[in-house]
């Protein structure tokens, strides 16, 4: 026996389990949370009813509200079952006014929080909001740590997969990681993945752009300051090191850190403490440091621009990120992804790329990497009609690069036919599952390119691999999987 109550829940709404034998309380809970759009409640009068109905779908829940006093299995028994089956599910226990000992038992058994009867509507709503938000953050951390997330955001190539495997090895350690790659290659994305697979994923992730902070403010930003320590210091402020305590501090563009500040940073990392400006008392911290640079720190060391001792402290485990121009497979994937995103954002119905546009994608050096590719395709989508004919309409940059594909036989157009990927009815209805759509779109672009190049090189797959900059075995696999044998 149970009941379900939904507000204006739609896709992305929150599912909350309520186990309470006093059914008048159900209406009180509904009223307390009526302002929270998208929340959907499942009410049950007993632990047994709840487990029978939702026991196999606990992973879909965002929070649970459980009364400690229930017929049959009591609330603490149910809490134990939920904790074993779905450890990340936040469970809010409801206790009686004089049951302080029971509240302690609940917290020891793994409850996320507890609330005492009679409770106020605002108190209940606030606690449930915190529980739901915590659940969403936990899910996001799991997704950020997944291979699927990295492949979607950076591409499915072996080069990206190799970086992901390296991160998975170093992530759970305490080693300081230095990410080396050109601007726009996704260094912060990878830093967040390192945090997500570390032993402290629930801790804070604090990012600092060392090149964006004026030299006069960098020390106060990193170490914090006390009220009155300088003009404008009207209150105490924690520095980035203290804010990152228990988590990860990401020092982006570390090569831009002024030389005098490098010594202070080294001292902080060695001592594991900082002293805020205007204070005599050091503040201890426990953090994992990930740094990133778009220039060669070793070269800066050789030129006397970066401290060698700090370099060794930050680069306990360096990871090189390949530029986009070296990852043809990712170019195709990201081009298709950015086209879909631009169509959705700009409410356009652009069906694909012409041969000229594809050749420009493959030939461009993409010095701005993923960031530049996204921007260029977004602009091209805005001015395109049925398809993107050229990447930079009206720009002198068009045709300025030598294509890896000199000429391609056929009708000269690699077009993603809209009807082959999705129906116009699905567009009008707003029913477009993004991931399957992206997969089909990438496959069509890839098949069109490979089929044309294969014909152009007379079926010579080794020459085809050299032309496209792909590994020979990769070409054989793609030709087979795409039905081009």
Image (cartoon, rainbow, N blue to C red):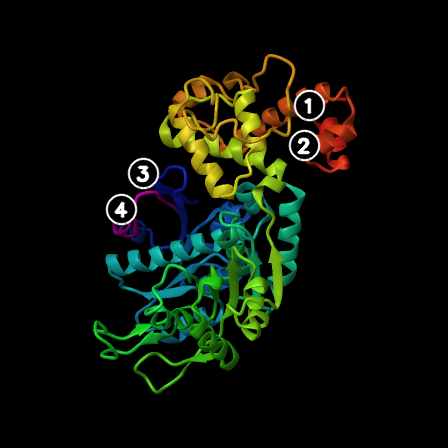
Q: Residue at x 47, y 50 (%)?
A: 50
Give me the disc on residue 8. Answer: 3
- Residue at which label 1 appears: 453
Q: Earlier in the sequence, mark 2 or mark 1?
A: 1
Mark 3 crowdedness (10 Å alpha carbons): few <14, some 14-19, many ≥20: few
Is 138 drawn above or below residue 227 in the view shown?
above
- Kindly report which numbered mark, 3 or 2, lies closer to the viewer in this rendering: 2
Other-residue count near label 4 (Cα within 10 Å), few / some / many at <14 / 14–19 / ≥20:
some
SS assignment at label 4: loop
Badge 2 vs badge 1, beta-carbon distance below 8 Å = yes
Q: What stretch of residues is rendered in magenta?
A: 28-41
Q: Position of residue 117 (x, y in %)?
A: 29, 64
How far is disc 1 from disc 3 in space, using C-alphas? Answer: 52 Å
Q: Is residue 341 visible?
A: no
Residue 468's disc is 2
Which residue position holds label 4? 34
Asked if the magenta segment contains residue 30, the reply would be: yes
- First of labels 3, 2 by sequence position: 3
Residue 434 to residue 24: above or below: above
The mark closer to the camera, 4 or 1, is 1
**Residue lying farthest bottom?**
280
Asked if residue 182 can be seen in this view, the reply is yes
Q: Please, which residue is most extreme toward the top here?
A: 411
User: Residues under labels 4 and 3: Cα distance?
Assistant: 9 Å
Q: Quadrant of the N terminus?
A: top left
Q: Position of residue 412 (x, y in %)?
A: 58, 15
Query: Marks 4 and 1, Cα distance to the nearest angstrom?
Result: 59 Å
């Amino acid at each position: 026996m149970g009941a379900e109550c939904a507000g204006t829940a739609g896709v992305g709404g929150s599912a909350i389990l309520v186990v309470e034998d006093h059914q008048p309380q159900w209406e009180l809970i509904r009223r307390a949370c009526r302002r929270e759009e998208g929340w959907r409640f499942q009410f049950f009068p007993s632990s047994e009813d709840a487990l029978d109905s939702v026991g196999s779908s606990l992973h879909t829940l965002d929070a649970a509200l459980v009364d400690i006093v229930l017929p049959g299995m009591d609330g603490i028994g149910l809490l134990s079952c939920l904790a074993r089956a779905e450890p990340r599910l936040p469970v809010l226990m409801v206790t009686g006014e004089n049951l302080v000992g029971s509240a302690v038992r609940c917290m020891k058994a793994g409850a996320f929080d507890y609330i005492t009867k009679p409770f106020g509507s605002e108190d209940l709503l606030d606690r449930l909001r915190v529980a739901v938000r915590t659940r969403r953050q936990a899910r996001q951390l799991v997704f950020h740590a997944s291979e699927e997330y990295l492949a979607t955001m950076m591409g499915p190539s072996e080069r990206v997969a190799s970086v992901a495997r390296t991160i998975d090895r170093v992530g759970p350690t305490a080693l300081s990681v230095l990410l080396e790659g050109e601007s726009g290659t996704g260094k912060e994305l990878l830093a967040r993945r390192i945090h997500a697979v570390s032993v402290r994923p629930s801790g804070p992730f604090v990012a600092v752009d060392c090149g964006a902070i004026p030299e006069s403010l960098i020390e106060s930003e990193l170490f914090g300051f006390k009220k009155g320590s300088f003009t404008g210091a009207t209150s105490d402020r924690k520095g980035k090191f203290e804010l990152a305590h228990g988590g990860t501090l990401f020092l982006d563009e570390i090569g831009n850190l002024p030389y005098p500040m490098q010594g202070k940073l080294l001292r902080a990392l060695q001592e594991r403490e900082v002293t805020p400006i205007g204070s005599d008392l050091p503040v201890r911290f426990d953090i994992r440091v990930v740094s990133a640079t778009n220039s060669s720190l070793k070269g800066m060391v050789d030129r006397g621009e970066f401290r060698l001792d700090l370099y060794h402290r930050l680069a306990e485990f360096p990871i090189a990120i390949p530029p986009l121009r070296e990852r043809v497979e990712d170019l195709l994937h990201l081009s298709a992804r950015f086209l879909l995103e631009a169509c959705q954002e700009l409410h356009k119905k652009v069906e694909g790329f012409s041969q000229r546009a594809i050749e420009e994608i493959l030939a461009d050096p993409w010095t701005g990497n993923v960031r530049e590719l996204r921007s260029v395709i977004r602009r091209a989508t805005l001015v395109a009609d049925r398809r993107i004919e050229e990447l930079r309409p009206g720009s002198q940059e068009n045709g300025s690069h030598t294509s890896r594909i000199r000429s391609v036989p056929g009708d000269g157009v690699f077009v993603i036919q809209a009807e082959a990927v999705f129906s116009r009815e699905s567009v009008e209805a707003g029913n477009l599952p993004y991931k399957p759509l992206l997969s089909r779109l990438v496959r069509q672009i890839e098949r069109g390119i490979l089929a044309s190049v294969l014909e152009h090189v007379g079926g010579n797959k080794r020459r085809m691999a050299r032309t496209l900059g792909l590994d020979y075995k990769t070409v054989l696999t793609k030709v087979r999987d795409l039905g081009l044998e």
